[in-house]
């Protein structure tokens, strides 16, 4: 299994264009199941999760082509409604296919997605919403069998928690359901608005995304369309942290800074100069980062949980002690033990991580624990003098489009080692 080798301690300089958003392209690829003609999707990042989504589409009978960062999906030949177990295991977020498959095929069979590295990741909100729309759900031998023989109908749904995935699943199921669906307490993430933009360009009638009340008027059918995925705000924050922690200066292009307001605040509090210019952000790091006031992860537009590990890693070398509170997932600190291998001083208690900044980190051999935890380890390795080795990089490859090449373009001494 290959590893990432980092010779840290070098300042990052230069500029890169940021990849398309993982958490937008995945639901958009699922949405192609609903479209009765060819869909062309631009700015798709090259990720293993995207590959898994394409495998799921092919398993359902769709045809998929990839050319650079453009993916073409034709679901006219859709013939199945079951996601193979192996693919469900590869990508937990394949649960977002559920609403689209039921919307197109009136039936879907998936293996119940197991708990993930972030703690239990139930789908009760997804299933109870779909049941209100006419879906019957039964569980047999670890499979969820969902069917709506009479077709889906609109419903008024109140989400007990603004779940991103549940909001997406309801939108996908409601797009071609009979009647209107209203989601109260919907998630407001930009990736949900991007999904709605994709669906509306194919003929759907979805209103209110970005607010906590979304209305979907079901339509007969959806056509094909062409769409460009929004930039990845979490990948952008990751590269900013890489520059911040090495004392460098970088410019990121093709961004939507308006999606990153709560994240940019933390970099500024840490002493970075952050300049916005259209779709670019330039970050200049101070000689040494400062501690920041307590950061709490919240649903959008609050501070994103996915930027938590990245921020904690960045602050391991700040002057002073910083506190991070993880309010979204139950167990998102598994990466902390790996950061401690670099000499980081972090104490966790429940959902709180207290980081006492140290002057410098030292190189270490470690493993990625999950996607964003893996990114946190890359950040620590870039800050640490000497050679660090990072294993289990498949976690990182799920969400970062060739992070090694991107960081090399910014002057990092980083490479893959093929065993
Ligand atoms: C999406 O996950 C993202 N994944 C996550 O990004 C992100 O961290 C998360 O939203 C929050 O922003 C994708 O979009 C593919 P949720 P999702 O449903 O939809 C609980 C990354 O690193 N919950 O908003 O799974 C759940 O347990 C990944 O890119 C229920 O209780 O997140 C969690 O505590 C990680 N019942 C909280 O809600 C449900 O039915 C947030 O989950 C659903 C969720």
Image: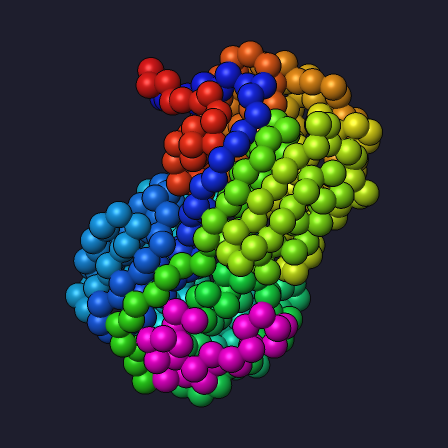
Quadrant where the C terminus is found in the figure? top left
Which residue appears at 28% of the width and 54% of the height?
70
The colour mode here is rainbow
Q: Is residue 166 above or below residue 297?
A: below
Residue 218 in the magenta stretch? The answer is yes
Q: Is residue 130 left or right of residue 97?
A: right
Left or right position of 142 against 247:
left
Q: Residue at x 71, y 27 (%)?
A: 287
Q: Would residue 340 appear left or right of 181 to someone viewing this image?
A: right
Q: Classify residue 288 as left or right of residue 240.
A: right
- Quadrant including the N terminus: top left
- The part of the chain drawn in magenta is 197-219
**Percent of width and height locating residue 26:** 40, 55
On the image, the x and y values in percent for residue 134 come to 45, 77
Residue visible at 58% across and 19% down? 9
Percent across and percent down for residue 45 are: 37, 47
Relative depth, front residue between 171 and 241: 241
For the residue pair 340 and 282, the one nearer the viewer reads as 282
Residue sitting farthest toward the top: 386
397 magenta-colored: no
Residue 352 in view: no
Is 71 located above or below residue 345 in the figure?
Answer: below
Provide residue 38's location: percent of width, then percent of height. 22, 67
Most foreground residue, 5 or 338? 5
Residue 220 appears in the picture as rendered = yes
Residue closest to the eye, 246 or 342: 246
Establish if 402 lies above or below 51.
above
- Residue placed furthest toward the bottom: 179
Q: Quadrant of residue 323?
A: top right
């Amino acid at each position: 299994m290959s590893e990432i080798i980092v010779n840290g301690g070098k300042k990052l300089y230069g500029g890169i264009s940021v990849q398309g958003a993982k958490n937008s392209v995945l639901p958009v690829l699922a949405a192609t199941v609903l479209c009765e003609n060819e869909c062309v999707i631009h700015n798709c990042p090259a990720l293993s999760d995207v590959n898994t989504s394409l495998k799921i589409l092919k398993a359902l009978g769709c045809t998929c082509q990839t050319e650079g960062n453009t993916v073409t999906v034709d679901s006219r030949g859709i013939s199945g409604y079951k996601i193979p177990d192996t693919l469900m295991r590869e990508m937990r977020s394949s649960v977002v296919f559920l609403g689209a498959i039921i919307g197109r095929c009136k039936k879907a069979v998936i293996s119940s997605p197991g708990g993930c590295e972030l703690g239990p990741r139930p789908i009760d909100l997804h299933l109870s919403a779909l049941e209100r729309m006419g879906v019957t759900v039964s569980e047999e031998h670890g499979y969820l069998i969902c069917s709506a023989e009479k077709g889906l109908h609109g419903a008024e749904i109140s989400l007990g928690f603004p779940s991103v995935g549940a909001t997406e699943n309801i939108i996908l199921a409601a797009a071609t359901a009979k009647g209107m669906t209203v989601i109260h307490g919907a998630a407001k993430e930009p990736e949900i608005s991007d999904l709605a933009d994709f669906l509306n360009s194919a003929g759907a009638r979805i209103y209110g995304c970005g607010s906590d009340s979304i209305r979907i008027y079901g339509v007969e059918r959806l056509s094909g369309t062409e769409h460009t995925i929004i930039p990845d705000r979490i990948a952008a924050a990751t590269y900013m942290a890489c520059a911040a922690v090495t004392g460098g200066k970088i410019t990121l292009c093709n961004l939507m800074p308006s999606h990153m307001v709560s994240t940019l605040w933390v970099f500024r509090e840490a002493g970075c100069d952050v300049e916005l210019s259209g779709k670019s952000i330039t970050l200049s790091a101070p000689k040494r980062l400062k501690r920041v006031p307590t950061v709490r992860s919240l649903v959008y537009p609050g501070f994103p949980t996915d930027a938590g590990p990245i921020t904690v890693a960045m602050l391991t070398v700040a002057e002073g002690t910083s506190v991070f509170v993880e309010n979204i997932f139950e167990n998102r600190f598994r990466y902390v033990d790996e950061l401690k291998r670099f000499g980081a001083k972090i104490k966790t208690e429940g959902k709180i991580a207290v980081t006492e900044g140290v002057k410098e980190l030292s190189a270490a051999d470690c493993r990625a624990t999950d996607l964003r935890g893996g990114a946190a380890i890359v950040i620590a390795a870039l800050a640490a003098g000497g050679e660090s080795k990072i294993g289990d990089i498949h976690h990182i490859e799920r969400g970062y489009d060739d992070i090694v090449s991107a960081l090399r373009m910014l002057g990092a001494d980083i490479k893959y080692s093929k065993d």
